[in-house]
Image (spheres, coloured by chain):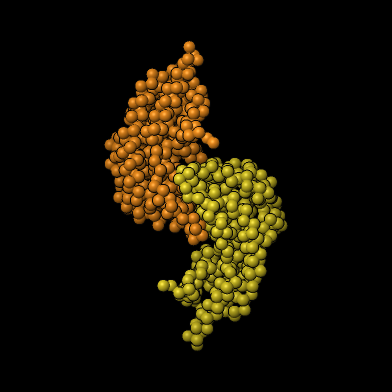
Chain colours: A yellow, B orange
Amino acid sequence: MVQRNRAEIDFGINYSPFNIPASVLQRVKVTQNAVSTYPSPHSENNLTLLSKYLALRKDNVLLLNGSSEGFFILPQACKFKKSTVITPTFWEYAHTLSLHNVQINYLNLLPSFSLNLADLEENLRKSDSVYICNPNNPTSSHIKKDILAFLISKFKNKIFVVDETYLLFSKNYRKETLNQLAAHINNLFVVTSLSKFFSIGGVRLGFCVSSRENIDLIRKFKNPYSTNIFAEQLLPLLFKSSGYIKKTREFLDAEKDRVYGMVARLPWLTPFKPSANFVLVKIEDPKVELKSLLTYLEKRGVRVRSGTEFKGLSNRYFRFCVRTRKENDSLIKSLKDFYTISSSRNS
Amino acid sequence: MVQRNRAEIDFGINYSPFNIPASVLQRVKVTQNAVSTYPSPHSENNLTLLSKYLALRKDNVLLLNGSSEGFFILPQACKFKKSTVITPTFWEYAHTLSLHNVQINYLNLLPSFSLNLADLEENLRKSDSVYICNPNNPTSSHIKKDILAFLISKFKNKIFVVDETYLLFSKNYRKETLNQLAAHINNLFVVTSLSKFFSIGGVRLGFCVSSRENIDLIRKFKNPYSTNIFAEQLLPLLFKSSGYIKKTREFLDAEKDRVYGMVARLPWLTPFKPSANFVLVKIEDPKVELKSLLTYLEKRGVRVRSGTEFKGLSNRYFRFCVRTRKENDSLIKSLKDFYTISSSRNS
């Protein structure tokens, strides 16, 4: 029997700390009729509701099998030749670009992880496109909307791909999202995964917003039946869960800063100020090895994400997700205990 | 209240006449744990079971989000330049090839729908690849295994893509499938959808078999999380449903010939001898219009597939799926009634 305090708490996956209401899942039915019904082409049955939620027209939105489907399609449809990717970031941008022999101009944000606009502009001049995760995974840094809008307007012949998966966690989502802008110009795709905000990575849901011409283009490259029938059943229920959406956003708005503050008080660690529902941390004490830390945490049933999993990071970094208050407190306690034990060994 | 005899019977979709056992669907759970669990990358959790069922090694099989995912990937991965497509056939081959600017050499089987080997060989010499649906949709014709094996061996530098979705319905599936051959040579991909045989178009499941090198290649182009968690739950249960598999194959083996015989006795129609679970029919009476027939059938709650939906066919053809004995008898009765009414109007 696994003891309660040994149960695994996964700070490694950037999920919401809360569950969507059980009543929502109960309404997804695995019946003969459901499994034998083909999804509507390009999940068009759900477009009305989703586009209404986003305050957009239907022809500016494409439903996706997770944001991944969008990233696999974009290089095919847009035929990028040279693309800027800001690192460290989500691995799929570079992976899907390299499948289509796109030359990647990496722009590394180390050591401060703050974006130098001049650097980005210089890099952009050598590229036909740029991928920006905003807020960025794993740094949890955020580029303000007006800066992005300025760049997008200045570089009209460059395609901007902005991943707003983690912006969904923001109280200011509706103000900060570029969805509205994307619908009205021709050089911006906004891609958003629903997996993280609703903790539904198994369901496969995401969406892309762009001009009608751009959506028409990428829709052609999409398998029209890629979204399964359970995802079709679930999607409208998710966006009607306004209680869940509000609670998650309000809780994280305060809690991410509380957790950041607690880590900042540990002298051997430097957290980076989070804009999203996760925190990137640098190990400052040269005597502390990430591997030992991960092993220790794992023994306590706590999982975080190693910096070695990201190009442009290293084994001096780890990332953890902001979970419930109690879970976050237990993570901080584990970190403190680890350092006490490891310091006594080293001394 | 819809009357029983008005309930719609869908002969338009090439599904099995039977349902998978209800106990199978009951074991697919929509729980918090399920939806929040990412599918295993490339559905690797299911590979052991599926490859065992197919008597293949795991590295010769790739799980797919329906066969469609395979067709969207193949032109990207194999970089075809000129491809032979035998028409009439499933629309997705030409569609996915055209997305990547592959020149398509069509080989039209009209009027007999039997394949002339010399024609195919001549066409193949002008192509680097060929798509063969076997049995073919919508003709229900079948190319024998030894003929295909001969061609594949003779044209070693041409890539053969063989769609065996409807071979799953055959009593001789294990004898007739090219899966074993595909695992051992370098110029054959066998793609199979599970949607039709198990009537699960909403779930999104299919697979591809080829050499290890070929599978490694196409796996790179695949979204590793394209298969949803419910499909992952369902797949092992499907292949353990040996009663369903056997019953479906044995029933259709006899029933398709019985239905063919009944249509053959109608003087105004010519059915083509079916190898799969559906029958293509030509309207021989020039006074009969397909549109009137479809309208009449629809009023009787019966849906069939119009020949106009296939490139290389026309409004002189329709396709219907073989369903249960009672349903098939009711289709034949509707066809007879239609002709009686329409003849009396025309005389």
Relative image position of residue B185 (x, y in whole percent): 32, 46
* Res. B130 visible in picture: no
Write the residue at 35% across / 40% down.
B248
Write the residue at 41% across / 48% down.
B22
Write the residue at 46% across / 55% down.
B29
Relative to residue B180, is residue A271 depicted above or below?
below
Relative image position of residue B194 (x, y in whole percent): 40, 44
Relative to residue A188, is residue B119 depicted above or below?
above
Relative to residue B342, is residue A49 depicted above or below?
below
Relative to residue A265, is residue B44 depicted above or below?
above
Residues A340 and A48: in front is A48
Furthest-top residue in this view:
B347
Furthest-bottom residue in this view:
A347
Q: Is residue B185 left or right of residue A10?
A: left
Q: Quadrant of the N terminus of chain A?
A: bottom left
Residues B300 and A345: in front is B300
Write the residue at 35% across / 21% down.
B265
Relative image position of residue A8 (x, y in whole percent): 48, 70
Q: How many marks?
A: 0
Relative image position of residue A203 (x, y in whole percent): 51, 54
* Res. A34 visible in picture: yes
Residues A214 and B119: in front is A214
